[in-house]
Image: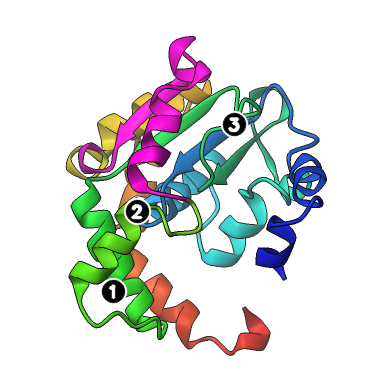
Amino acid sequence: MRQHISGTKLRVPILWLRHRGFRSSDVFLGSYPRSGSTWLRFTLFEMLTGRTANFESVNTSLRGPGTHRLALPVLPGNGRFLSTHECYRADYRKAIYLVRDIRDVVSSEFWFEKERGVSYERFEDYLVHMLQGRKKYGSWQDHVRSWIESESAKNGTLMLIRYEDMRRDPGKIFAELLEFLGKKVKPDAICSAIANNSLQKMRAKEDALHSMPESLK
């Protein structure tokens, strides 16, 4: 149904409705799929709310375009922290862009789709498919370019974060991120949130989600 609609005259008004109602105090997290946005959102959620991060609490509080009216205001000025895998739009006035090494993105996405029954005989075939932009969000390189060459990047309201830097020194990167968001969080709360959402604990949370009956997800 979605693919059919996207090729009709309904696409423009649907996109317009999807992106209505943003606030000037909202901040957006943009990323290409499999770039680490789930980990960032979980960790930041605990820093901003003091609540335990799990898929239910995070996904119902930190939403994205289309469901943003239901998002929890967690930023100054009643702002919301909204995430998207879309290319940059002018609506995303203040934003964070999370970028990850394309080699890791491709590898992660390949195995992620294999686990869900999307089969490619060879990794090389999948790589060509992805680089040619045959994915839902286009090619990785076009996606990155749309953000780093955006108006927000030019006027200083875009913060660029490398996934590798965030993994290497999460305390430093999250402190800088919180400053960009205008939020003051105690150092011990930052450390606690990072520890609560370590790689091992994130895997445990994902395993718990996948083992949950569909009726409870």
Q: Is residue 23 above or below residue 101?
A: above
Q: Residues within 10 Å of mark 2 (few under 14, many from 20)?
A: some
Neighbours of disc 1 within 10 Å: few (<14), some (14-19), many (20+): some
Q: CA distance from mark 3 to mark 1?
A: 29 Å
Q: Which residue is mark 2?
A: 132
Three-letter code for the amino acid on which mark 2 is drawn: Gln
Residue for point 78% across, 40% down: 16
Assess disc 3: are there few (<14), some (14-19) or many (≥20) residues with their C-alpha within 10 Å of its C-alpha. few
Foreground residue, 207 or 152? 152
Query: Would you say the residues marked 1 and 2 are in contact, meaning their CB atoms lie under 8 Å apart?
Result: no
- Quarter of the image where one finds residue 154: top left
Q: Are marks 3 and 2 in contact (CB under 8 Å)?
A: no
Is 198 displayed left or right of 42 in the figure? Answer: left
Q: Decide which of tag 3 and tag 1 comes sooner along the chain.
A: 3
* Residue 168 appears left or right of 70: left
Residue at 49%, 48% in the rendered image:
46
Tell me the residue that label 1 is attached to: 111
**Which residue is disc 3 drawn over?**
89
